[in-house]
Image (spheres, rainbow, N blue to C red):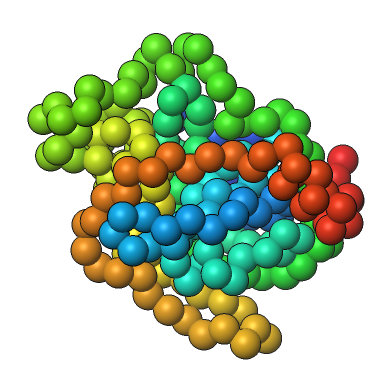
Amino acid sequence: MSSDAGSRITSIGQLVPGMKNLNVTFIVIDVGPSRRTQQGHDIRTVRVADPTGSILMCVWDTVAEVIKSGEIWRLRNGYTSVFRGALGLSCGKAGDLMKIGEFFMLFSEMPNMSEYSAELAAKYPMPRKGSPSDENGGNGNSGGNGSGGANGDHNTLQSYLGGKLVVDAGSAQVASTGPNHGSRATRRPFPLSRAEDENQRGKIPRIGI
């Protein structure tokens, strides 16, 4: 693969299930509450957007602690997965996230790429709990790159397990690496509640298109 191909930016509006090695630049428009998994990891669900649409993304541990609404980030080597009929964006063990700015980016919240799709729900069904695919992992039904379990929940929730965080030089945060094991979270990344969404909207300069 050429360097140009390896650095090509994919728009959120172009995302479909099963995409890998994605480079995406986005602004964070909503940040959900932090939750603790059974394995002791902190996780947040955030909504990110660019001029072509928005999508839900899970961030873990250090990123979950520092990410804020209105910040502009760049994802490298990400992938898409499907959970309960909704498309999501993930970082993965081989990916990294870099904060590159704040506020000044045109974006559109529509189309919502994480909106429920009956077609996706039928194509990527949830495996039965305790099934071999659920226990053994693999790329299975999630439409992801196989770094998580076959369950789309596992695959999406593993978006930052073992991933790298790179923060811009002007930030007080320093580079950090995530855990290097394969723990699998089982809690669903819920979207923002209406109250949380309205609260966040009051804090972000609405510069969308």
Q: Is residue 209 left or right of residue 128?
A: right
Q: Residue 103 versus residue 69: which sits nearer the camera? A: 69
Residue 155 in sight here: no
Residue at screen point 48% across, 43% down: 189
Rendering coords of residue 23 (x, y %): 52, 53
Closer to the camera, 20 or 132? 132
Residue 193 position in % (x across, y down): 67, 39
Could you say which is closer to the camera, residue 205 or residue 92?
Answer: 205
Give the side of residue 135 with respect to residue 73, left or right: left
Q: Quadrant of the C terminus?
A: top right
- Which image quadrant for residue 10? top right
Residue 4 pos. (x, y %): 51, 56
Residue 145 lies, with reference to residue 38, above or below; the image says above
Q: Residue at x 22, y 28 (%)?
A: 129
User: In which image quadrant can residue 101 be found?
Assistant: bottom right
Report x, y in % for residue 173: 57, 83
Q: Which residue corresponds to the image point at 31% horizontal and 55% vertical from the top-left?
A: 38
